[in-house]
Image: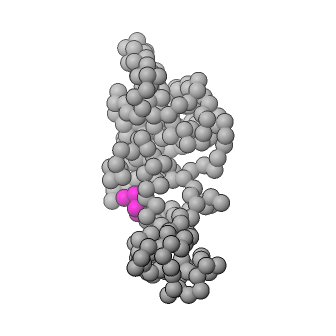
């Protein structure tokens, strides 16, 4: 919960919906279009955003208002993920500069960070920035589905969820070394020592690994506390 800033000129165009095709989402969209025909401009945008949110996630008793700058959300979400995705759908709408999140979460979890995409960003680079592990781009992609349809389709001004993660585990395959494993996860071989040091309980030397061993891949200077 709280106030979140977004890029007002970026994001979903009003009237373009996505996400779930469930009956309740279609009903919300139909209601938004009907409301837009009779409402003020701000009320029409609020109805549109409400329909867009419900086409992606389930928020009970969702209420949305818009004053031309800030969207205010209230309601109840069963998970932190649904609440955060509701904020992103609202904020990543053209014309919205801020989202005032008042959604109650039934089972609170550690919150995500937000990243505003800039020109030249990729999910791999973003993963490297927040986790120190570029291969965790798939975590960010999954954390922003179904709003993101492809890991290469992000745009400047878009705001993404960056959730806390556990250090990944790598199962050693034939022919691998700590150097090749480091390159797979970090993009360069030089972090092999970090992998060794994170696995001294099962490794006697950085030069000796065995097929089938499960190695912890440490997060390198993560920007948020890792999950236990």
Residue at the image point whose x is 44% and y is 69% from the top: 185
Residue 135 position, x and y percent, is 43, 64
119 left or right of 223 in image: left
What quarter of the picture does the C terminus occupy?
Answer: bottom right
Q: What stretch is highlighted in magenta?
A: 121-125
58 left or right of 44 in image: right
Residue 149 position, x and y percent, is 36, 44
Residue at the image point whose x is 56% and y is 58% from the top: 165
Q: Look at the image and tell me whether residue 95 can be seen.
A: no
Q: Nearer the viewer, residue 93 or 40?
A: 93
Against 153, residue 17 (above or below) is: above
Magenta part, dominant SS: helix
Residue 56 position, x and y percent, is 45, 34
**Which color mode does the image show?**
one colour
Residue at the image point whose x is 54% and y is 77% from the top: 195
Q: Which of 38 and 85 is in front in this view?
A: 85
Residue 8 covered by magenta stretch: no
Against 120, residue 172 (above or below) is: below
Residue 44 position, x and y percent, is 42, 21
Residue at the image point whose x is 60% and y is 42% from the top: 80
60 left or right of 31 in image: right
| Residue found farthest to the top | 38
């Amino acid at each position: 919960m709280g106030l979140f800033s977004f890029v007002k000129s970026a994001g979903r165009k009003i009237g373009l919906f996505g996400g779930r095709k469930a009956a309740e989402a279609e009903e919300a969209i139909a209601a938004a279009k009907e409301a837009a025909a009779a409402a003020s401009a701000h009320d029409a945008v609020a109805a549109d955003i409400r329909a867009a949110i419900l086409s992606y996630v389930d928020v009970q008793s969702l209420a949305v208002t818009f004053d031309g700058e800030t969207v205010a959300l209230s309601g109840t979400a069963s998970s932190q993920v649904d609440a955060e995705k509701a904020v992103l759908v609202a904020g990543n709408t053209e014309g919205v500069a801020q989202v005032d999140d008042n959604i109650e979460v039934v089972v609170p979890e550690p919150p995500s960070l937000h990243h505003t995409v800039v020109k030249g960003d990729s999910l791999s680079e973003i993963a490297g920035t927040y986790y120190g592990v570029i291969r965790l781009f798939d975590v960010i992609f999954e954390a922003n589905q179904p709003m993101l349809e492809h890991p290469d389709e992000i745009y400047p001004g878009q705001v993404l969820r960056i959730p806390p993660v556990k250090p990944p585990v790598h199962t050693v395959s034939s022919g691998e070394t700590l150097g090749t494993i480091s390159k797979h996860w970090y993009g360069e071989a030089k972090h092999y020592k970090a992998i060794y040091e994170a696995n001294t309980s099962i490794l006697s030397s950085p030069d000796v690994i065995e097929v089938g061993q499960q190695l912890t891949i440490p997060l390198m200077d993560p920007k948020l506390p890792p999950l236990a």
